[in-house]
Image (cartoon, grey):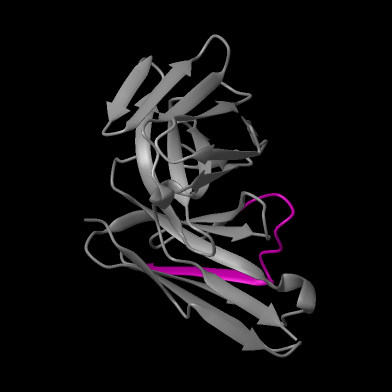
Amino acid sequence: SQQGEEDPQALSIQEGENATMNCSYKTSINNLQWYRQNSGRGLVHLILIRSNEREKHSGRLRVTLDTSKKSSSLLITASRAADTASYFCASGLGSGAGSYQLTFGKGTKLSVIP
Amino acid sequence: GAVVSQHPSWVICKSGTSVKIECRSLDFQATTMFWYRQFPKQSLMLMATSNEGSKATYEQGVEKDKFLINHASLTLSTLTVTSAHPEDSSFYICSANRRGSYEQYFGPGTRLTVT
């Protein structure tokens, strides 16, 4: 499977600022998901956006999806020190033999400075 | 909630021995479970997909005789690293789907060190 790309690879911001992370993928998808991983821990699901959706909100999170450009973005508003983590996008085909498999991007390491 | 546990959280073993890692869905039935491997500062690489009661599907390049996966029930999957070598040292993470859901719920991971 081919991984998507995320940029930036690392992002350092001050508490209270907004953080934007971008993700690109290579194949047609059914859904795109964002996950968060604290150092040395498992992943936590943040949000899922379907291929027929363009934008989705969840609390301080805003996700956009542009299927024509095969890209997505995750915006975290009013960041907090506790948001410090690595963020991964993951694309799902939603059909075929691997319908529930996810292909993960390389991740963005976010540091929020108090 | 949808909680997935893994055991052990970390293990150190000697070269040539085998190690079993358990992945359990605690409060839901997992129709599909996934096993990933993650090297330091890198992304997750899918190793295999397992469905309850059937053989696991391994990704290209993953040796099925070395990484034995058993999905014995709707709440339990195990990964056994056989004849472990130092290059098998890694962070192994499992995840699980609820029936009909695309979201994956991840275990906390198991750090394996082979000496």
Residue B104 visible to an observer of this rendering: no
Residue B62: x and y in percent read 70, 58
Q: Magenta part of the protein: which range?
A: B58-72
Q: Nearer the viewer, residue A47 or A95?
A: A47
Picture residue at 66% right of the left edge, 68% below the top: B90
Residue B71: x and y in percent read 43, 66
Picture residue at 29% right of the left edge, 62% below the top: B3
**Was residue B108 drawn as part of the magenta stretch in this picture?**
no
Residue A46: x and y in percent read 36, 41
Residue B22 visible to an observer of this rendering: yes
Q: Nearer the viewer, residue B29 or A108?
A: A108
Q: Nearer the viewer, residue A3 or B19?
A: A3
Seen as rendered, the residue at the extreme top is A68
Q: State which quarter of the image contains the C terminus of chain B.
A: bottom right
Task: Decide if residue B2 is on the left or right side of residue B18.
Answer: left
**Was residue B67 drawn as part of the magenta stretch in this picture?**
yes
Q: How many marks?
A: 0
Instruction: Please tell me whether residue B110 is drawn above or below residue A72 in the rendered image.
Output: below
Instruction: Please tell me whether residue A80 is drawn above or below residue A29 in the rendered image.
Output: below
Residue B103: x and y in percent read 36, 43
Q: Nearer the viewer, residue B15 or B53?
A: B15
Quadrant hosting residue A79:
top left
Picture residue at 50% right of the left edge, 23% below the top: A72
Task: Decide if residue A9 is on the left or right side of residue B79.
Answer: right
Q: State which quarter of the image contains the N terminus of chain B.
A: bottom left
Instruction: Please tell me whether residue A30 is drawn above or below residue B47 in the rendered image.
Output: above
Picture residue at 57% right of the left edge, 56% below the top: B48
